[in-house]
Amino acid sequence: MIEITDKPIAPEQVIMRAKTSGSGCVVTYVGVIRDNSHDKSVVSVEYQDRDGKAVEKLQALTADAKQKWQVENIAFTHRIGKLKVGDINLVIAVAAGHRGEGFAACQYIIDRFKQSLPTQKIETYADGSVKVGGD
């Protein structure tokens, strides 16, 4: 299940959506807004789904991972809106029969997510500057 939300994310709910009766593990990645980026103090990070295609982009990403590794299920929730330091911005949960497949698929998904954000990212810093785009 892929979800884009403007509400706080509960990781345990994403895990519950991913796990199946055949799951030997659920490998989870929890992304958190940190207090610094590019040697600057972060005030907030905003994610926007401007083109309304974030779900579609994430579905393609998870489908690709399912073709590469034997996984039971993948749940991915990404939060949009203005987030503050410490807020969870995404949770990826990969259910697999074996941990090796689960870890590999989860690593792949987060790496691809970072390379090609499905949403627009806007970081605001304490010095008043703003950065639009990924890392």
Image (spheres, grey):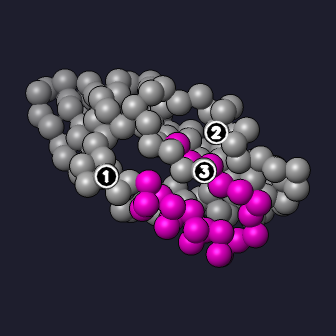
List the residue tagged with mark 3: 1
List the residue tagged with mark 1: 52
Residue 37 on image: x %, y %: 31, 39
Residue 28 appears in the figure: yes
Q: Main secondary structure of the magenta part?
A: helix
Q: Quadrant of residue 48?
A: top left
User: In this figure, what is the number of numbered marks?
Assistant: 3
Tell me the crowding category of disc 3: few under 14, some 14 to 19, or many 20 or more residues within 10 angstroms, Cα based. some
70 left or right of 65?
A: right
First along the sequence among labels 1 and 3: 3
Relative to 83, say whether 134 is above or below: below
Q: Residue at x 44, y 54 (%)?
A: 55
Kind of residue sitting beneath label 2 = Val
Q: In terms of secondary structure, where does tag 3 sit?
A: loop
First along the sequence among labels 2 and 3: 3
Range covered by the magenta-colored residues? 55-77
Q: Quadrant of residue 124?
A: top left
Relative to 115, say whether 133 is above or below: above
| Residue 14, disc | 2
